[in-house]
């Protein structure tokens, strides 16, 4: 996705409390398992991230790449740890 604007359905989902990664994943029609395979993480790790647990920069970058979204969209989240 070259346009860094967040699509309206994602903004709506986020305003209703949906985690940004889940909102993008569902918008793109991916299951948790689909995203896990695409970014090389376990499905449980994706579930934990979408539940609000902290995650590191490496995970953030892999997830952004797998969802084809600019990393900056996820960088804005306050729950990201820069620990490796």
Image (spheres, rainbow, N blue to C red):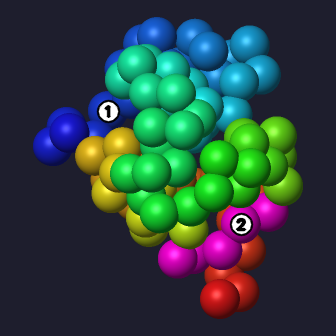
At numbered mark 2, what does the secondary structure look like: helix, strand or loop?
Answer: loop
Q: Would you say residue 32 is visible in this rendering?
A: yes
Give the distance between the C-alpha atoms of the residues marked 1 and 2, in whole angstroms.
23 Å
Identify the residue at horizontal 15%, vertical 43% (top origin).
2
At numbered mark 1, what does the secondary structure look like: helix, strand or loop?
Answer: loop
Q: Residues within 10 Å of mark 2 (few under 14, many from 20)?
A: some
Q: Residues within 10 Å of mark 1 (few under 14, many from 20)?
A: few
| 25 relative position to 15: left or right | left
| Residue 41: numbered disc | none
The residue under label 1 is 5
Q: Nearer the viewer, residue 69 or 25?
A: 25
Residue found at the very far bottom of the displayed protein: 84
Identify the residue at horizontal 65%, vertical 88% (top origin).
84
State which quadrant residue 3 falls in. top left
Identify the residue at horizontal 69%, vertical 17% (top origin).
15
Q: Would you say residue 72 is visible in this rendering?
A: no
Identify the residue at horizontal 46%, vertical 11% (top origin).
9
Residue 76: image x %, image y %?
57, 55
Location of residue 62 with respect to 30 vertically, above or below: below
The residue under label 2 is 55
What is the span of residues highlighted in magenta in the rendered image? 54-58
């Amino acid at each position: 996705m070259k346009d860094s604007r967040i699509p309206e359905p994602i903004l709506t989902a986020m305003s209703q409390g949906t985690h940004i990664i889940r909102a993008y994943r569902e918008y793109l029609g991916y299951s948790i398992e689909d995203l896990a395979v695409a970014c090389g993480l376990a499905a449980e790790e994706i579930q934990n991230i979408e539940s609000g647990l902290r995650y590191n920069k490496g995970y953030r970058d892999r997830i952004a790449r797998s969802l084809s979204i600019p990393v900056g969209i996820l960088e804005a989240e306050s729950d990201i740890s820069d620990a490796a």
